[in-house]
Structure formats: structure tokens, C-alpha cells
Image: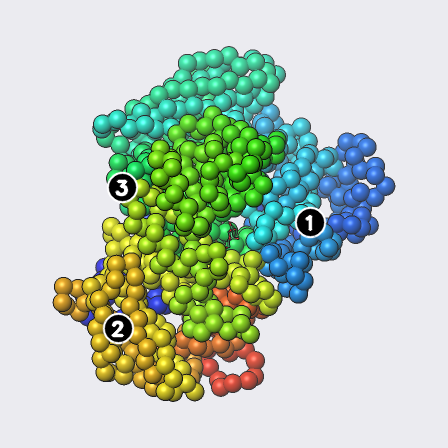
């Protein structure tokens, strides 16, 4: 079956407007790429035994504690004697009774489950009652009992947390293990000495989200994956394996390195071998290190070089990945192994020519994004990362900035696999031990990812970035030096909201400007040897499907809303997209996010900066970007007409009509009568004003004098039925029965002619039965305070989203969407079945 792209639809004579309106349906090409990428991810790799890496997400217990009253916090902190002796924490013993605690699986974000509170102090975190003034809902206790089989005797057993928000204490079998005090960096503990072998064990985590880092929503809880890794005493160090590539002619040299630790009691001889596999899993190179002896409790560094002939390069269009199987051998036997993925590519920032990937000039067409999504908050199933990236790819976005924190591993992996470049940012700009530790964790964890082209040491640090910021200059220099040591292959920068002349910027390899279009030209003239890009731009605002700003309703029209410090999409892209020496930039933001409700406060609970809403439904500006950012196979003709044509009660009033297009000319028809044709200005749009009368508006776009694409908006009648489909960006009606995979569903209301009603706001209820459960709902309305978790949601301007997750049992998930409440006309319900197929489960803790 041919790919469903707008071009194919056009060829088959099905131009948009009716069943497919350009504003509401995305093509599937980006998702098809995601599918291919995931198939590649699934390729069978040689067993990495004797190492065992087990997912530790299922079967946890949860209960709220209390941040001020120890009596309501399992007695923790009562009497100041808690840490007096080792092993006396009863709540962390197997026999402790947690039968009344709630059952849940990770990743989990409890903040998204809480009701909203009208408390302006909580505005930036989306009006959720989390923080020091909310002791009852700011501490969460997680408990899990688990088996450690007798066969684990003699192995090292380490627990890995990919990210917990925020400060966490960990106990195992009554013993305090350690703590971690940030919300984004991964951390791990070696549990070996504390575990009972061949018996039940217990782990407890007390997570305290009282403090935060964000002026944006950060969630609360164990919101990323947890793993249990079992290895030989002689094993690879955490995040120590790297593969650095350099290309020369038709060959790539891969410089390989790792650290082996000996946690045993005797010296051990060890050597490391590397097997490099191409994307199809074929071995293309092998190499090994010299042998070394490692003292007990010691470690040693091993290196080697491999050569790849005619390497397949990683690029935005062809994100080719290689993997290296890194194996430690001791006494002729493989004792530990891990797989790292990497790519071969060159990424160069040039002060005169901007950015080039593999020697080809390419503009960074980027977006900044926070990490939360409708329905699930900060706890995203892996598949949702791919979904979100596919949405962004669809508009030609080729880069993301992980503002303002170290990202979730699966977001980075999705970028590697889908060919999206990254500016990877740490949370704390500081050279204090915590700041450097976060930075080091980020660089070591992700330095093999070909998607990453810039390390960012932070964002808008007012005290560190100004002219006389001596502290800034010193902190910046230390951080940059540290990154260069860990990864000599990439540039270091930060997102600076100022002139970049002094302070922290002095140490940067390349210079990023946030907003302030008056600065870059001046800077470039004065500093001709430093490459420049837009680290954060735009901050345009709009509410999806809204065409007049209404301060009483906290909505912003789709045409030209922008905050005073920002630029519209057209303004910033005409600036960065037209200067050869500019590398491009990152628009604030790709997706709407919870918190920072700009430009209005309560009752708005999320931002309106997104080019797509909280669910990933495009706002109109999406098509501005799609028009001008399309490239390679993504380059499709675009004609996008707005607003809708449902203006009942406004008959005879003038309505602003805009079209985004990358064709030569667009002609507008209002109720069948031409309003004239206009040339589309480069990087601009065309617009008309027409008086409203029910009927239709249509835009016909032509290239070389021929109409090639049209878009139409018709006045619909009232909703009579519900439509429930799999979101076209995903398109899968069958998902994995692994307890992790999801289906993202689109909910609409249709009129009696079967047309989606763009203004519908009906409340819809969802019944989910069979082998799946509902894990979240959303509608993209920044002012909606309905629960993200209840099985119902109002449509917002015609759309809502439901996310369902499979169980581990193969079968079917049945979803029924019905009208909720008693008011208004009846709506015919809709039903949808998602199949779930049997798959091999990821190895997991029992
Ligand atoms: C920037 C900041 C972002 C966001 C944005 C809103 O200054 O870096 O995090 O707050 O403003 O326009």
C-alpha cells in the first residue's frame, strides 16, 4: 500500500478539505520512519550474558507520606534517631504490611493525578498542590518486594534509576542505602551487600517533591524507568563505554574506550573486545584492547581503535546507527558485556557558513520542549516519546532542545533513531559538586548518541551571563572544560538571554541567543570567529482552533500572538532562516506544556507557546513551519487555510482568512466566488478578509500556473455522532501486549454529513475493557481543569485524546466513546478495538 501522504492523496484525486482537512490530519511518513526505526531497535543482538539487565517497573506499592509530620510519614524522622543503627528501618523490611498501599507500575507521576488548586505560588508548576506548603501531597513512598534467586550468589547487583522527581532516600532490607537530590540525572546504587540471596527482598524509596527547579511543570515521583542489573564482580563501569568516530575519505576511525571495575577480592586479568555491528546486525569490525591486571576494588581503562570502510553515515534523512558490543574477558571467559549505539557523522559549526552535517549545509530547524504530555504528565510510556517526535518531524522540525534539563533516555534514543538532532541541556548551571555531577552524568550517559550536536550547560542564568559576571565566567569555564574532557568531539554552549559579550559566554564554543534579534548581527560583526545560532526563539502564543483573543476566556488567536519578548514564527524564521552564517535555531516551544501558563494565569493551567497542543494536535502555525521547513522526502506542497467556517451569529461580519503555503500562488474562494489570487511571499503567508455567510471557503494553491493542492473549510451543522480513531501519526490498530505499549486515540464529533465539527465541546466518556487500560486523557485546552485520569473528557475545538496501554496478556482492547452528562442532543457512540499481540517481554524483576 502506498504511503498515505498528501501528495499520494492528491495523485489519487482526493484533495483535502472534506474527509481530510490539512489542519487536522498529519501524514504518516514520520510515523512510518518511527516504525522502521523501532524495527531496527528490535534487531536480535547476541546475548549479553552473563550480564542481566532487568526492568524494575512493574508491581510497586505507593502511599503518600508527609513532609512535615513524621507521624504521617511512616514515622521517618520522629525522634531524630533514624540513622543511629544500620538495618533498623522496619518499613523497608519484607514483613512490613503494605497491603493497604496502592498498586501501581512505573513510570509514575503523582502530580498529574492531583486536583488543581487556585494558588498563584503554584502557577509555574501548573497549579498542582506540590511543594513545601502542601505537605500531604509532596512526599510519596514507593515499596516493592522482589526475589533474588540463589543463582545470583557472587554477582554484583545494582539498581539504576533513570530519573526521580525529586529528592529521594533509598532503603533495602531495613538498611539505608543512599539519597539523590535532583530531579533529572540518573543515579544508581550497588545493593549487593544488602540483599538476601535466594530469598525475598524489599526496596523502599521516599520521594520528596517539596523542592523544585522549574518555572515549568516538573511532575513528582519515579517518573522514569528503574532497572536492576546483575553482573560479574569484574564488570564494565557505569556509562564508561564510548565510541568516538572521525571520518576521513571513505573510512571512519572509531576510537573505543571503557573502564572495567574489579569488585572481587582477588586481582583479575582482563581485556576488552569490541564487535561493531551495522544497522542490519552484521559484524563489520572487531578489535580488542591489551590485557591488564586489575587489583581488587580497582579499575582500569581500556581502549582500542576500529576502522569502518565506507561507513553509512547518520543523518537527518538516514539515521544509520551502529552498535558496539563491548565484552570484558577474564581468564579467557566473557564475564560482562554491554551494547552501545553510535553513529558516524560530522557536525561542524562554522562562523561564516552556519551548521553542516556530513559536510552538507543544513539549518537547524529546531524546537525547545519540556517533557510532559497530556494525560500522563512527566511519566511517559516509551512509545509516546516516538509519537511526540514523529509529530515534530511531520512539520519539518529536525532538531530539539531538551529544555531545561537532562532528558529521558528514550527521548534521546528516539532522536537517534528518527534522525532528529539535539541540543542536550543540563539542569543546574554550576560548577559546584552537584552541578558538575549532573553535567558529567549527562555527557557520559549520552555521548554516544549521534543526534546530539550541542551540549548545553544551562539556560538564562541572570546572575552569570551579564557583563560583570565574574562568577559566570569562572563557572562557565570550569563546566566547559569538564565537558571537553569527557567528550572532545562536540561543541559546548548554553541558552543566553543577553548580548553574550561577557560572563558565562566567554567559555563557549558556539554562541546561542535567546530572543533579542537585535544582538546576533552585532555580535557576528564584533566576533567573526564564533559560530552563532538561536538557542531559543519565538515564544509565539496561540490556542488551538481559536481565532479571536479573549482575555476573559484566556485564549489567544491563531494569527500573530506573541509575548513582548518574543517573535512570531515568521519574524524569527525570516531572521535565522536567511542569514548564511546563522546555524538556525530552536523555537519555544514544539509542544504546549503544563505550567508557566502564559499569557494568562488561572484558570489557565498550561502554556500556550506550543506549535502543537498538549496532545500533539497541530495549531495553525504548525503549517507555517511545514511550509518552510519541509526538506528531502518531507518536502510536500502545503496549503493550509484557516480559520474554520463555523461563525454562526456572526453573519456579515468580516473574518480574517490566512493561508500558509509553499506554493507560488493561492486563490481564495468564498462560497464559490473568487476573492482573488495572491503570490505567496518567501517565508510568509497570504491573507484576505471576507464577510461570513454559511457555506465554505476554499484555498487553491498553484505551482507553475497549475493548481496542485487545495484546502477547504465548510460550515458544519451540530454534532450528531462521535468518531474514535487511532491517531493518524501512529496509525497502529495492533500494539504489543507487554504492559508498556500504548495506542494514542483521537476523539472527534461529526455532524450529520460526517464532517468533523471544529467547534465541538461535548463531554465524552470512555469505557475501556479487555486487555488494556486508560492511562490518560487530554484535549489541548490550556484552560481545562478536568482530570487527566478520569475516563471522560470534553472535546476542545473538536478534539480530545485518549491514551490506552496494553496489559501483558495478548487479546483485544475495546474502547467505547459515549456522550456523558444529560444536557444537549444525543450523540451516536463510537467503538474501537485495538489488538494486542504476544511479544517477548523485556526481561524484568519478579
Ligand atoms: C524563556 C525561558 C523559557 C520560557 C520562555 C517563555 O526566557 O528560557 O523557559 O520561560 O522564556 O517565553
Q: Position of residue 825 (x, y in %)?
A: 49, 86
Left or right of 247: which side holds 339? right
Residue at image point 49% right, 45% down: 498
Q: Secondary structure at mark 1?
A: loop
Q: Position of residue 837 (x, y in %)?
A: 42, 55
Q: Position of residue 663 (x, y in %)?
A: 22, 63
Residue at image point 78% right, 41% down: 90
Gap in angstroms between the C-alphas marked 1 and 2: 52 Å
Say few, some or many: other residues with alpha carbon within 10 Å of mark 3 (under 14 / 14 to 19 / 20 or more). Answer: some
Nearer-N-terminus badge (1/2): 1
Tell which tag, 1 or 2, sits nearer the viewer.
Answer: 2
Q: Are marks 2 and 3 in contact (CB under 8 Å)?
A: no
Nearer-N-terminus badge (3/1): 1
The image quarter containing residue 32 is bottom left
Res 604 label: none
Q: Which residue is mark 3?
A: 361
Q: Which residue is mark 2?
A: 699
Q: Secondary structure at mark 3?
A: strand
In the rendered view, would you say 373 is above or below 73?
A: below
Nearer-N-terminus badge (2/3): 3
Amino acid at each position: 500500500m502506498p504511503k498515505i501522504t498528501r501528495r499520494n492523496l492528491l495523485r489519487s484525486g482526493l484533495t483535502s478539505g472534506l474527509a481530510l482537512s490539512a489542519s487536522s490530519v498529519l501524514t504518516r511518513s514520520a510515523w512510518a520512519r518511527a516504525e522502521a526505526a523501532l524495527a531496527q531497535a528490535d534487531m536480535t543482538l547476541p546475548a549479553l550474558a552473563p550480564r542481566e539487565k532487568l526492568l524494575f517497573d512493574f508491581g510497586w506499592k505507593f502511599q503518600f507520606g508527609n513532609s512535615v509530620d513524621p507521624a504521617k510519614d511512616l514515622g521517618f524522622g520522629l525522634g531524630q534517631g533514624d540513622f543511629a543503627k544500620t538495618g533498623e528501618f522496619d518499613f523497608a523490611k519484607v514483613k512490613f504490611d503494605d497491603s493497604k498501599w496502592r498498586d501501581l507500575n512505573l513510570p509514575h507521576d503523582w502530580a498529574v493525578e492531583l486536583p488543581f488548586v487556585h494558588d498563584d505560588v503554584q502557577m509555574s508548576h501548573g497549579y498542582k498542590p506540590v511543594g513545601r506548603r502542601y505537605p500531604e501531597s509532596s512526599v510519596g513512598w514507593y515499596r516493592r518486594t522482589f526475589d533474588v534467586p540463589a543463582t545470583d550468589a557472587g554477582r554484583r547487583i545494582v539498581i539504576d534509576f533513570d530519573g526521580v522527581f525529586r529528592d529521594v532516600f533509598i532503603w533495602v532490607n531495613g538498611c539505608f542505602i543512599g539519597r539523590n537530590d535532583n530531579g533529572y540525572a540518573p543515579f544508581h546504587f550497588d545493593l549487593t551487600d544488602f540483599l538476601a540471596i535466594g530469598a525475598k527482598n524489599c526496596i523502599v524509596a521516599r520521594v520528596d517533591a517539596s523542592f523544585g527547579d522549574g518555572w515549568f511543570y516538573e511532575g513528582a515521583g519515579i517518573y522514569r524507568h528503574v532497572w536492576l542489573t546483575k553482573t560479574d564482580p569484574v564488570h564494565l563501569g557505569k556509562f564508561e563505554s564510548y565510541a568516538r568516530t572521525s571520518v576521513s575519505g571513505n573510512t571512519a576511525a572509531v576510537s573505543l574506550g571503557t573502564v572495567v571495575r574489579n569488585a572481587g577480592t582477588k586481582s583479575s586479568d582482563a581485556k576488552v573486545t569490541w564487535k561493531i555491528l551495522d544497522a542490519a546486525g552484521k559484524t563489520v569490525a572487531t578489535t580488542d584492547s591489551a590485557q591488564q591486571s586489575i587489583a581488587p576494588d580497582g579499575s582500569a581503562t581500556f581502549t582500542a581503535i576500529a576502522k569502518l570502510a565506507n561507513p553509512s553515515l547518520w543523518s537527518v534523512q538516514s539515521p544509520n546507527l551502529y552498535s558496539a558490543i563491548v565484552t570484558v574477558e577474564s581468564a579467557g571467559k566473557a564475564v560482562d558485556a554491554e551494547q552501545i549505539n553510535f553513529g558516524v557523522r560530522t557536525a561542524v559549526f562554522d562562523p561564516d557558513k552556519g551548521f553542516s552535517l556530513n559536510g552538507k549545509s543544513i539549518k537547524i530547524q529546531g524546537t525547545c520542549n519540556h517533557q510532559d504530555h497530556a494525560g500522563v504528565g512527566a511519566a511517559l510510556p516509551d512509545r509516546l516519546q516516538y509519537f511526540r517526535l514523529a509529530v515534530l518531524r511531520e512539520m519539518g522540525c529536525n532538531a530539539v532542545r531538551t529544555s531545561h534539563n537532562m532528558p529521558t533516555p528514550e527521548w534521546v534514543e528516539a532522536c537517534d533513531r528518527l534522525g532528529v538532532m539535539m541540543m542536550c541541556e543540563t539542569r543546574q548551571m554550576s560548577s559546584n559538586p552537584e552541578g558538575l555531577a549532573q553535567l558529567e552524568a549527562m555527557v557520559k550517559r549520552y555521548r554516544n548518541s549521534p543526534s546530539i550536536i550541542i551540549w548545553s550547560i544551562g539556560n538564562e542564568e541572570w546572575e552569570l551571563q551579564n557583563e560583570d559576571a565574574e562568577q559566570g565566567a569562572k563557572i562557565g569555564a570550569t563546566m566547559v572544560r569538564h565537558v571537553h574532557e569527557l567528550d572532545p568531539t562536540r561543541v559546548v554552549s548554553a541558552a543566553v538571554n543577553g548580548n553574550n559579550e561577557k560572563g558565562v559566554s566567554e567559555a563557549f564554543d558556539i554562541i546561542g541567543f535567546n530572543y533579542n534579534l537585535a544582538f546576533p548581527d552585532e555580535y557576528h560583526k564584533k566576533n567573526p570567529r564564533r559560530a552563532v545560532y538561536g538557542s531559543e526563539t519565538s515564544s509565539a502564543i496561540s490556542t488551538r482552533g481559536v481565532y479571536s483573543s479573549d482575555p476573559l476566556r484566556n485564549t489567544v488567536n491563531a494569527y500573530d500572538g506573541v509575548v513582548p519578548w518574543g517573535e512570531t514564527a515568521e519574524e524569527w524564521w525570516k531572521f535565522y532562516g536567511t542569514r548564511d552564517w546563522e546555524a538556525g535555531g530552536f523555537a519555544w516551544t514544539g509542544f504546549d506544556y503544563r505550567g508557566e501558563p502564559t499569557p494568562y494565569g488561572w484558570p489557565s493551567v498550561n502554556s500556550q507557546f506550543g506549535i502543537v497542543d498538549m496532545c500533539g494536535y497541530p495549531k495553525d502555525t504548525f503549517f507555517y513551519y511545514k511550509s518552510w521547513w519541509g526538506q528531502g522526502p518531507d518536502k510536500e506542497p502545503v496549503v493550509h487555510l484557516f480559520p474554520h467556517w463555523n461563525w454562526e451569529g456572526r453573519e456579515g461580519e468580516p473574518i480574517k482568512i490566512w493561508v500558509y503555503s509553499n506554493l507560488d500562488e493561492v486563490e481564495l474562494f468564498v462560497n464559490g466566488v473568487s476573492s482573488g489570487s495572491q503570490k505567496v511571499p518567501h517565508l510568509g503567508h497570504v491573507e484576505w478578509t471576507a464577510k461570513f455567510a454559511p457555506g465554505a471557503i476554499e484555498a487553491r494553491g498553484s505551482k507553475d500556473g497549475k493548481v496542485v493542492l487545495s484546502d477547504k473549510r465548510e460550515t458544519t451543522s451540530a454534532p450528531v455522532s462521535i468518531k474514535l480513531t487511532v491517531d493518524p501519526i501512529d496509525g497502529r490498530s495492533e500494539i504489543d501486549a507487554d504492559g508498556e505499549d500504548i495506542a494514542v486515540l483521537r476523539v472527534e464529533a461529526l455532524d450529520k454529513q460526517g464532517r468533523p465539527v471544529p467547534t465541538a465541546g461535548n463531554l465524552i466518556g470512555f469505557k475501556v475493557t479487555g486487555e488494556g487500560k486508560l492511562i490518560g486523557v487530554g484535549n489541548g485546552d490550556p484552560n481545562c481543569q478536568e482530570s487527566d485520569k478520569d475516563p471522560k473528557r470534553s472535546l476542545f475545538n473538536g478534539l480530545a485524546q485518549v491514551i490506552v496501554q496494553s496489559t501483558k496478556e495478548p487479546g483485544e482492547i475495546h474502547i467505547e466513546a459515549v456522550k456523558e452528562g444529560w444536557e444537549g442532543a444525543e450523540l451516536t457512540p463510537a467503538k474501537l478495538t485495538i489488538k494486542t499481540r504476544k511479544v517477548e517481554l523485556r526481561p524484568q524483576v519478579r
